[in-house]
Image (cartoon, grey):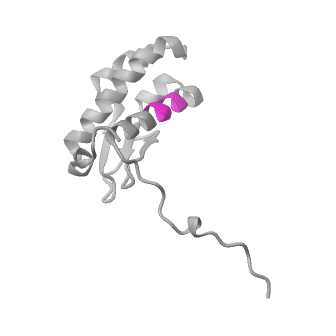
Amino acid sequence: MVWAKFSWKMWRSPARMRSQQAVAARAAKVIEQVIFDMGAPRLVQGAVRLDPGFRPRFHSCALAPAPRALASVPLAGLAEAAPLRSFADDPAALAPHTAALVDALLREFRSQSPHFRALPPQA
């Protein structure tokens, strides 16, 4: 009988974000990656959902309510996302807007999720 290599890491749940600062850093990476892949105007048409592991995830369409999601933010509804609608994909010009968008996302996550508010601000 042949045994396959087995790792307990496969069966553990994914790592959880440990602070609001870690969630903000991950949200910034997600936003930058979406801008790189699809462009800033397409980013604004989507939504960001906070999953139970406190990981922000981008969705390119409007989201139906999900029972396991901690928070869901349509980006078109944020005032901080409005300048991104007309931007070309110049990373230097987008950096201040990305930071403002991350701050707006964290504000919305705090308002929608008591679990997110319970995370420490910094690790």
The quarter of the rendered structure image containing the N terminus is bottom right
- Percent across and percent down for residue 92 are 51, 12
User: Residue placed farthest to the right in the image?
Assistant: 1
Question: Does residue 55 appear to the left or right of 8 in the view shown?
Answer: left
For residue 41, above or below residue 12: above
The quarter of the rendered structure image containing the C terminus is top left
Specify the quadrant of the image occupied by residue 9.
bottom right
Q: Between residue 108 and residue 53, name the one nearer to us.
A: 53
Question: Does residue 120 appear to the left or right of 102 in the view shown?
Answer: left
Task: Decide whether residue 31 is among the magenta residues.
Answer: yes
Question: Does residue 116 appear to the left or right of 55 in the view shown?
Answer: left
Q: Between residue 49 and residue 41, name the one nearer to us.
A: 49
For residue 50, above or below residue 8: above
Task: Give the residue drawn at x 30%, y 35%.
Answer: 106
Which portion, as a residue range, is magenta? Answer: 28-34
Specify the quadrant of the image occupied by residue 80.
top left
Task: Give the residue drawn at x 37%, y 45%.
Answer: 49
- Percent across and percent down for residue 100 are 34, 21
Task: Give the residue drawn at x 34%, y 50%.
Answer: 64
Task: Give the residue drawn at x 30%, y 59%.
Answer: 67
User: Residue placed farthest to the top in the image?
Assistant: 93
For residue 24, above or below residue 98: below
Magenta segment main secondary structure: helix
Question: Does residue 109 appear to the left or right of 51 in the view shown?
Answer: left
Residue 88 visible in the snapshot: no
Q: Between residue 85 and residue 118, name the one nearer to us.
A: 118
- Percent across and percent down for residue 81 are 35, 23
